[in-house]
Image (cartoon, helix red, strand yellow):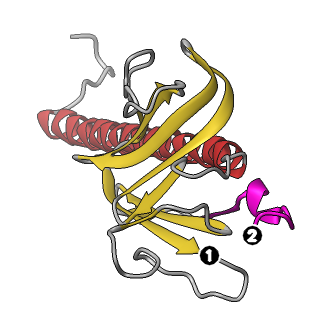
Amino acid sequence: MISGQKGMTLVEVTVATVIFSMIMLATVTALRAFAGTYAKLEEMTARTTQMREADRFLRVILRSAINHPDFFEGGLHALQWVAPIDRVGSAGGLQHLRLSREGNRLMLSFAPVTESDTPPAWGSVVPAFPLVSELDSARFLYQPSPTDPWSEGPFGGATDSIAALPRAIAIEVVSGGQPWPPLAVQFDASRDPERR
């Protein structure tokens, strides 16, 4: 060994290794926390995007519902109506639409309107589409006229569904433990003074 040259002692090497290990542990922990936050942010963004798209589509398609006997059925757990749509997959023109809960999803089903009195052929042209995933609950509220209160149940109490186009509908959705802003739509046909 050259005189005057000093090396590191075992204690100094051990202390340096411990300090380096602590810095690396803090860096890895910070990176994991960042990755977890990023994944949660992506999930929240995807859920918000799904909510906005579903809200926008339902507002447009519900607003244009046709006021005709047997073209509307509103119940506690499902909603069915007829409206013209531009194009969704292979479906276009006048379509029966049904919004219903199936398991933990809010499904939108399509069936073409035919001239026969047969029930709608759901899914014959376009398969049912999951509009909302991770659905906790869906609630349909109806307002028959501007002076009437919102109600969950059917009009008249005789059946379990509403068979006439009400003035407005509200849909309350809870998905992934988070309530969505209520979707309230006044039907265009209900604005017609000749309607009733």
List x then y, in percent, for residue 129: 42, 30
Q: Would residue 195 be counted in the magenta stretch? A: yes
Q: Which residue is mark 2?
A: 196
Give the vertical position of 180 relative to 101 (above or below).
below
Mark 1 → mark 2, Cα distance in angstroms = 11 Å
SS class, disc 2: loop
Please state if 22 lies on the left or on the right of 148 as rendered: left
Q: Which residues are magenta?
A: 182-196
**What mark, if any, has residue 144 been given in the picture?**
1
In this view, the residue in front, 27 or 108, is 108
Give the vertical position of 68 relative to 148 (above or below).
above
Residue at position x 48%, y 47% in the image: 44
Identified by mark 1, the residue type is Pro
Residue 188 seen in the current view? yes
Q: Would residue 44 be counted in the magenta stretch? A: no
Please state if 181 lies on the left or on the right of 107 as rendered: right
Residue at position x 51%, y 35% in the image: 96
Give the vertical position of 142 relative to 146 (above or below).
above
Please state if 55 lies on the left or on the right of 120 as rendered: right
**What mark, if any, has residue 123 been given in the picture?**
none
